Amino acid sequence: MTTQIEISKIKITIYMIGIVLFANFAGSLFSPITSKNDTDSDSASNPNPKSSSGNHLWSFEIDFWNAYQGVEQVAISADGTYIAIGTGYSYLYLFHKSSNVPMWGYQEMFLSNFVSSVSISADGEYITAGFVSGNVYAFHRSSGTPLWSYATGGIITSTKISADGKYIVAGGINNKIYVFNTTNTISPLLWNYTVIGQVHDVAISAVGSYFVAGANDVYFFNITGPTPMWTYDTGVVSIIEISSDGNLFIASYGKYISLFNRTSKKPLLNYTCNKGVEGLKLSDDGTFFGAGTRDTIFYFNSSSSSPIWSYFHSIGTVARYCGHYLFPQMDNI
């Protein structure tokens, strides 16, 4: 099984045991992406995978003990220069796009503490990672030694860093949201807040002024304090996305999608997909959003609750294996 991710002009193919980096994919973003099984000609066993739409730059194989310890998380800087990889072998790697030799690697003490979430600033200067151990880390790209670490006591499900790298937001199964100052190595925690239910996803605006969290409800915050500006009862939220300016955000819960404006908890629009939503992405300016179920991709203008188009794949893998990385560069249409 493989997953394909495209950011800017960089594409990574994630295999069970490693990654393959491609370039020059600017024109192929909305081509249907299919999943390939391990017997296909471009599987991880092939050292020089072929591609009909890009150039193979390099590949990197992850050491692992079993199928649950391969690549778990990927984050790519806005210009595609830096790539952070989290594995099930409790390793975090940082790569420059020019080389398959990691700039550095960091491993937690216990090998079962796989990396559950990774996020990187727009320029790739700062990286954050959350682990199953409950630890949240901040790194500078110059070193694999953490700037700081913070033990939350519960499995981390989502960590996000603002595009400018100033703030980190994290959430986990202990029903708490944590807000950190990235560069404060002495006392990084700014505040935390207890929500109803496990935190499944968080998202933060580009300069960190606003962020949103999804648990049993949607929670919208100003970064300055631990009191939500408002909450909205949706049911269990699986994925949440926010625009760069923080004015618009979108949440999926079950097979439902809701789009919000930060000034009101009443949704701007709602849409019911054919199945449970497994992938969701909002464009940086909030103009467009895409959603994927097990077999269908939907593409919307944020001004309408009717999709501009949808794409159905009878094999049932198009949206499922794209996961959270559907439509990562939608402003380039």
Image (cartoon, helix red, strand yellow):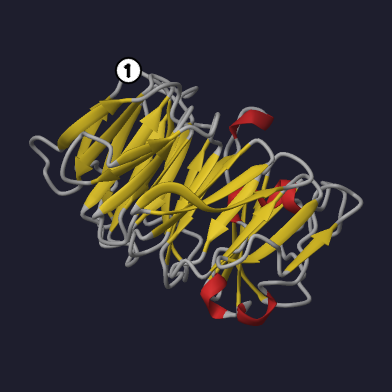
Q: Is residue 134 above or below residue 158?
A: above
Residue at the image position 77 percent from the left and 44 percent from the top: 294
Residue at the image position 51 percent from the left and 61 percent from the top: 100
Q: Is residue 110 left or right of residue 165?
A: right
Residue at the image position 20 percent from the left and 34 percent from the top: 226
Asked if residue 27 can be seen in this view, the reply is yes
Q: Residues within 10 Å of mark 1 (few under 14, many from 20)?
A: few
State how many labels appear. 1
Q: Given the current orientation, which residue lies at the most extreme left position? A: 186
Location of the N terminus by quadrant is: top right
Q: Is residue 22 above or below residue 326?
A: below
Which percent across, then down, holds residue 178?
Answer: 27, 33
Q: Secondary structure at mark 1?
A: loop
Residue at the image position 54 percent from the left and 43 percent from the top: 239
Location of the C terminus by quadrant is: bottom right
Which percent across, then down, holds residue 282?
Answer: 52, 60
Asked if residue 18 can be seen in this view, the reply is no
Q: Is residue 151 left or right of residue 259?
A: left
Q: Quadrant of residue 46?
A: bottom right
Q: Given the current orientation, which residue lies at the most extreme right position? A: 314
Who is closer to the viewer here, 188 or 45? 188
Who is closer to the viewer here, 171 or 133? 171
Q: Which residue is mark 1?
A: 153
Q: Is residue 14 left or right of residue 216?
A: right
Q: Is residue 176 above or below residue 276?
A: above
Which percent across, then down, holds residue 240?
Answer: 49, 46
**Three-letter amino acid code at the position of disc 1:** Gly
Who is closer to the viewer here, 301 or 13? 301
